[in-house]
């Protein structure tokens, strides 16, 4: 039977899945989810905007017994308005539901609940006060992000975690406005900031921040700073060069690289053969031909020839 192997279409590792999910955010997702799990904090998971499935694959790995995981994305379908349609055509023209599902199933036995629709439907599809973790990474337009944040607040349990992607990218000012508006006017309390994402809660951020600070201070692969603004403590994190993501299970298509084969025992390493040194008689002949009179040269050659025959 043929063995399944990773290809351009079948990822072998999480890093093979296209998408914007750097090692630092993989670390933070894992830390927040595992913290909830070790404390017996259960609840459903939701992702708004999935792209090719990279972050969804990690989220699905943390699904506990009795929990549900819901993914909502247009997947190239009909957008709710002209601005959203233009954004989708520009940035996500290659995205299809089939690609997402193929990538996800490379790592999991079953798909999450997939809703192929605008994220505005999520409040009707998922019950309020049932979720422990919501990741928002869909539209970059202010109106849509504003509504996605409102939906996340309704869906989350007390002390649940919301993650907002692209909150400070130069090409997504609508996300920045909606994010900081939620912090200043809608009760969202930041826990920490990465280069791409804001992690927050509508509960009490202080206990989570203290534990996170203790964890990150013990690492040498990321930087850490604390600032205060508008009554909020902001924990800023950044990855150092060469930071590696946390370990993650391989996909069903993964093939381990073959180790280098050792040289057979008892065989000496081959080397280039040494260049032979010219025989002394050759040097004599050259010198004689160049410097001595012809009669002397002929006599010298005869003498050398007789000596070679005797030897």
Image (cartoon, rainbow, N blue to C red):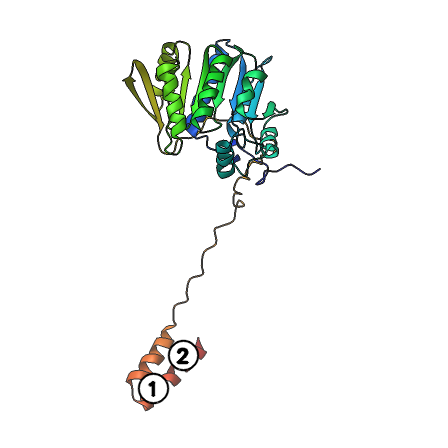
Where is residue 70? Give x, y as percent: 57, 20
Looking at the image, is mark 2 or mark 1 earlier in the sequence? 1
Q: Quadrant of residue 301?
A: bottom left
- Residue 267 visible? The answer is yes
User: Pointer 1: what residue?
Assistant: 297
Q: Quadrant of residue 191?
A: top left
Nearer to the camera, 6 or 144:
144
Give the position of the C terminus as an image quadrant: bottom left
Nearer to the camera, 302 or 274:
274
Mark 1 residue crowding within 10 angstroms, few (<14) / some (14–19) / many (20+)? some
Mark 2 residue crowding within 10 angstroms, few (<14) / some (14–19) / many (20+)? few
Where is residue 141? Give x, y as percent: 44, 28
Position of residue 69 relative to residue 39, above or below, is: below
Nearer to the camera, 67 or 51:
51
Q: Residue placed farthest to the right in the image?
A: 1
Where is residue 46? Give x, y as percent: 53, 19
- Residue 212 visible? The answer is no
**Element at badge 2?**
helix
Where is residue 198? Give x, y as percent: 40, 22
**Element at badge 1?**
helix
Q: Residue at x 55, y 22 (%)?
A: 60
Give the position of the N terminus as an image quadrant: top right
Horizontal side of residue 123 vs 25, given as left or right = right
User: Pointer 2: what residue?
Assistant: 307
């Amino acid at each position: 039977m043929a063995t399944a192997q990773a290809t351009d279409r079948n990822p072998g590792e999480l890093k093979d899945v296209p998408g914007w999910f750097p090692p630092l955010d993989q670390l933070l997702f894992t830390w927040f989810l595992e913290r909830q799990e070790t404390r017996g904090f259960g609840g459903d998971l939701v992702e708004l905007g999935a792209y090719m499935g990279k972050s969804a694959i990690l989220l699905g790995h943390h699904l506990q017994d009795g929990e549900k995981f819901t993914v909502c994305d247009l997947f190239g379908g009909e957008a709710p308005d002209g601005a959203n349609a233009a954004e989708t055509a520009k940035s996500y023209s290659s995205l299809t539901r089939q690609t997402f599902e193929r990538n996800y199933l490379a790592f999991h036995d079953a798909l999450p609940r997939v809703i192929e629709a605008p994220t505005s439907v999520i409040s009707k599809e998922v019950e309020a006060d049932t979720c422990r973790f919501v990741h928002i990474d869909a539209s970059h337009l202010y109106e849509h992000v504003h509504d996605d944040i409102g939906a996340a607040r309704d869906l989350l349990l007390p002390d649940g975690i919301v993650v907002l992607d692209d909150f400070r990218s130069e090409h997504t000012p609508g996300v920045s406005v909606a994010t900081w508006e939620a912090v200043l006017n809608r009760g969202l309390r930041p826990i920490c900031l990465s280069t791409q994402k804001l992690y927050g809660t509508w509960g009490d951020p202080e206990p989570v921040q203290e534990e996170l600070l203790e964890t990150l201070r013990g690492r040498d692969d990321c930087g850490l700073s604390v600032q205060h603004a508008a009554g909020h403590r902001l924990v800023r994190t950044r990855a150092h060069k060469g930071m590696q993501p946390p370990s993650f299970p391989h996909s069903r298509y993964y093939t381990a690289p073959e180790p280098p084969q050792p040289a057979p025992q008892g065989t000496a390493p081959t080397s280039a053969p040494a260049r032979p040194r010219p025989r002394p008689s050759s040097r004599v002949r050259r010198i004689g031909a160049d410097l001595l009179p012809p009669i002397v040269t002929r006599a010298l050659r005869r003498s050398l020839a007789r000596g070679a025959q005797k030897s």
